Image (tube, grey):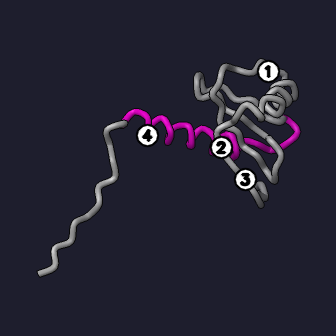
Amino acid sequence: MIAMDSLVIRTATASDAEALQRLAALDSQRLAVGPHLLAELDGQAVAALSRADGSVVADPFSRTDTIVAMLRRRAEQLAGIRERPGLRRVQPRFHLG
């Protein structure tokens, strides 16, 4: 089990380019085309997932298997939202007697 005091999964921005490249270099991988989801553990980038092709780069010196699974699940959630653009939240209507 990984102690996750502060795990943040978010969309990477242009200011994350250096962190993404660092992860790719640590993982001996080429960084795939973005956009990317980035996982930060206690403020440190530990894994990233390309939303374009699903490829992952991760810090091989950290236990990231659970974090990568969470990144994949979040990507699935976001893809589901994108596939249903017409779906909107319906507010319940209450009728008082």
Type of the residue with mark 1 = Gln
- C-alpha distance separating marks 1 and 4: 29 Å
The answer to which image quadrant residue 86 occupies is top left
Q: How far across and down, in percent of the image, does residue 65 sit?
A: 72, 42
Mark 2 and mark 4 lie on one chain; the one further toward the N terminus is: 2
Residue wearing tag 3 = 7
Residue wearing tag 1 = 29
Q: How far across and down, in percent of the image, does residue 46 sit?
A: 79, 41
Q: Residue at x 73, y 31 (%)?
A: 14
Q: Which residues are magenta?
A: 60-84
**Compared with residue 64, is residue 95 higher up or lower down, i.e. above or below?**
below
- C-alpha distance separating marks 2 and 3: 10 Å
In the rendered image, which quarter contains the C terminus? bottom left
Residue wearing tag 4 = 81
Q: For the residue carrying disc 2, how many other residues have a C-alpha within 10 Å: few (<14), some (14-19), or many (20+)?
A: some
Which mark is drawn over residue 10? 2
Q: How far across and down, in percent of the image, does residue 58 sit?
A: 78, 34
Q: For the residue carrying disc 3, how many other residues have a C-alpha within 10 Å: few (<14), some (14-19), or many (20+)?
A: some
Which type of secondary structure does the marked residue at label 4 adopt? helix
Q: How far across and down, in percent of the image, does residue 37 sit?
A: 65, 36
Q: For the residue carrying disc 1, how many other residues have a C-alpha within 10 Å: few (<14), some (14-19), or many (20+)?
A: some
Please name which of the two marks, 2 or 1, marks the residue nearer to the observer. Answer: 2
Please name which of the two marks, 1 or 4, marks the residue nearer to the observer. Answer: 4
Type of the residue with mark 3 = Leu
Badge count: 4
Mark 3 and mark 1 lie on one chain; the one further toward the N terminus is: 3
Type of the residue with mark 2 = Arg
Which type of secondary structure does the marked residue at label 2 adopt? strand
Q: Residue at x 70, y 34 (%)?
A: 13
